[in-house]
Image (tube, grey):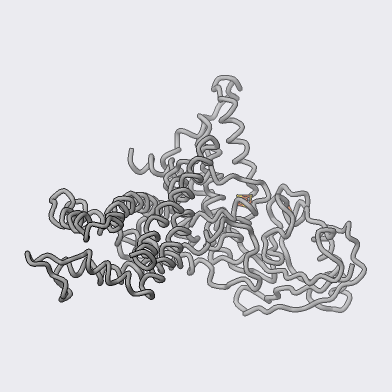
Amino acid sequence: MKLTLKIWRQKDAKSTGKFVIYSLDGISPNCSFLEMLDILNEDLIRKNDDPVVFDHDCREGICGMCSLYINGRPHGPDDAVTVCQLHMRKFKDGDTIVIEPWRAKPFPVIKDLMVDRTAFDKIIQEGGYVSVNTGGAAEANNILVGKENSELAMDAAACIGCGACVAACKNASAMLFVSAKVSQFALLPQGQIEAKQRVKKMVKMMDELGFGNCTNTYACEVECPKQISRSNIARMNREFMCAKMV
Amino acid sequence: MNSSFLRFSSITKKIWMAFLGLFLMIFLVVHLGINLCLLRDDGGAWFNAAAHFMGTNYIVKVFEIGLFAGFIIHIVLGIILQVQNWMARPVRYLVSNKTTTPFLSKYMIYTGCIVLVFLIIHFMNFYFIKLGWVSNVNISADGEPEFYIIAKELFANPMYSILYIVLFIVLGFHLNQAFQAAWQTLGVNHPQYNVCIQRFGTFYAIVVPLGFIIIPFYFLLIH
Ligand code: SF4
Ligand code: FES
């Protein structure tokens, strides 16, 4: 495949970046998107150029590190996959591919396509945990959990914290991420102890960090590689109302 | 961000937006009921009677305060939320977002602003007359504004009628997205009811604006 890449290059957090155009030839359609970028980078290193910096780790869709906004869609044109799971066969020979970093005030660019997602960690620190008593491991069946709730909690817990929901949202809202984290605990008895504090503190932090407000366009749900449902957002709103009123 | 209004959390603001939006949707049905009186060929007797009742009844007056507060808070919150949303992405994407989202859902602020502009025109035409802020030629013998004549004259102007029709089409799109969004914001999201909520919202967004749109057509074409 022959490709033209238009990539955001930015030296560091402080400098203003710009788009740089690269041409690539001989890319196999079976290549993954990140492998294609590896090939580009090898080329750049051979030419004594600065390689393009982008986040990645597991490359199997479970860590949530990869984060590229490709041709107007976070994680690219495929549905329900992270960009590390995206393959070049999703593109056509001769395509121009525009690659941008996540854009949101709380996600500043560190270099090129890599953004700082510490904001998510700060939200998690506010309440993404449960308190347990120390001592011997408790009997697993002491606390019974209904089948439906355990399934829903598991679905919510599938969130890998990639930030595609924020990147896709026209308001850079983090509601899908935060609601997944609130829901996974709100649905289980173990999460009840801190439930009220959790939702209030996590939402407060989300607002303070400068994420936008949800306006129900549901772009997050469409782009989420783990298909986190917006029903989690409704659940978080319920939890929030209860926590504020009771 | 030190004004107390801004310090409300994002979800609190959204919940108020949703709650007041639904409240305004109830009011719109009442308003439609009154407007449809215009279609009766009785020289405006019913319409003027309804306008008189709305203007003098004490329960309606209390309701009216809530209504105005509702309008103002819904609009102000909408603007605050939108400005915060613009600020949340200081650097824009080169390629605008290609994610498929519900029709016009991304443009609620714009459809809302169009409705607001019309609302101001509407106020100048009717409500300010009622308050006596605008001098008005159409005063009946007992000193009451002749709303029927005012309405008739306005609809006789094709420009006004077209504006009116376009406005209600825009409002229909606004409401179609708003109804289901309001329930989602208020925490009502269940696979069993989502379809019903969506369908009712669309039904409302078609039927109610259509009811309003019939009136200028009636005056332009038939009357
Ligand atoms: S909700 Fe989805 S898109 Fe958002 S951070 Fe979690 S996995 Fe990524
Ligand atoms: S690199 Fe781990 S999810 Fe893509």
Number of marks present in the image shown: 0
Q: Is residue A236 left or right of residue A5?
A: left
Q: At 46% across and 44% down in the image, what residue appears?
A: B200
Of the pair B171 and A197, the residue shown nearer to us: B171
Where residue B6 appears, x then y in whole percent?
35, 62
Farthest residue, direction left: B142
Instruction: Choose top left, top right, bottom left or bottom right for residue A101.
Output: bottom right
- Quadrant where the C terminus of chain A sits is top left
Whether residue B91 is situated above or below residue A225 in the rendered picture: below
On screen, A136 above or below A120? above
Q: Is residue B120 above or below residue A196?
A: below
Can you give x and y, in whole percent of width and height, for residue A20 in the image?
74, 79
**A75 with respect to A13 (left or right):** right
Res B75 → quadrant: bottom left
Out of B24 and A74, give the one closest to the viewer.
B24
> Picture coordinates of residue A73 (x, y %)?
67, 62
* Coordinates of residue A115 in the picture (x, y in percent): 64, 65
- Viewer can see residue A93: yes
Quarter of the figure with the N terminus of chain A = bottom right
Left or right: where A10 falls relative to B178:
right
Residue B67, quarter of the rendered image: bottom left
- Tell me what residue is drawn at x 48 percent, y 55 percent: A206
Q: Is residue B65 visible?
A: no
